[in-house]
Image: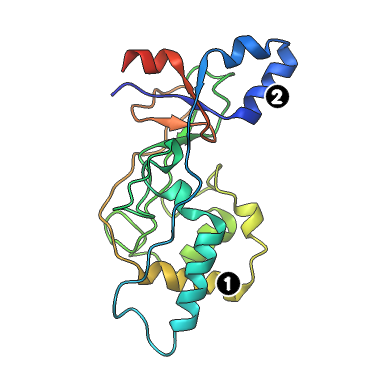
Amino acid sequence: MICRRYLAAIPLMLMACTTGSTYDVLDEYEELDATTEVDAPSPIPGSYSPDNRDAIEQGKYMVGLLGCGVCHTDGALAGAPDREKPLAGSRTGIAYTNPLEYHEPGVVYPPNITPDEETGIGRWSDEQIALAIRAGLSIHIGSPITVMPWQGYSALRDDDVKAVVAYLRSIKPVRHRVPAKVQPGSKAIEPFVYFGVYQDRKDQARD
């Protein structure tokens, strides 16, 4: 598969201001109509109980408010979310090094956060899920996920984090494996975005 590179408007403009070539840089990219609206899926029937009903509802609200589905739903970063696989991870990755500085940037693929035991978080403990939310820590990577906005989530209240964990355990498990992290200098074989607004015209022409 030809790798499609996407770049965001803000990083592009910052780079352009330092080089004095705003028109030349932007002329190489096509603006995408990326979505910013992906609804949090409803809990599966029977997942509620009198003890956890309020927490699950609060968690669903938090996941929608924080926009988790935009990164963790396949295709959403490029404007075409797969609504049959909400929160099941994205095969469109996010560059975590600047593609304007590195020919082959490092790329991470937002993971499956449904309770599937093989490809999602079904085997994670509540504490591991909470650490992923608050500190961007993945049990598979062992270091903070660079593009995860955990710095903002670190201030979440304990009851909000517990509610998100309860909600994620209540939704339908979806079997969907995402690509592994790509190190800088290695070629990504799946599409990726740089905060998802612009696509490289040269890659589009090769499709």
Q: Residue 125: tell me if it is visible.
A: no
Distance from Cα at disc 1 to Cα at disc 2: 35 Å
Task: Residue under label 1, please give it.
Answer: 160
Spot occupied by residue 184 in the image (x, y as percentages of width and height): 49, 26
Pick the front one: 93 or 203: 203
Residue 47 relative to residue 58: left or right: left
Task: Residue under label 2, please give it.
Answer: 14
Q: Is residue 71 above or below residue 173?
A: above
Task: Sort mark 2 into few (<14), some (14-19) or many (20+) by Cα contacts within 10 Å.
Answer: few
- Kindly indicate the quadrant of the structure image that contains residue 17: top right
Which residue type carries mark 1?
A: Asp
Q: Secondary structure at mark 1?
A: helix
Q: Residue 64: tell me if it is visible.
A: yes
Q: Residue at x 29, y 80 (%)?
A: 46
Residue 47 relative to residue 56: left or right: left
Q: Secondary structure at mark 2?
A: helix
Spot occupied by residue 105 in the image (x, y as percentages of width and height): 50, 25
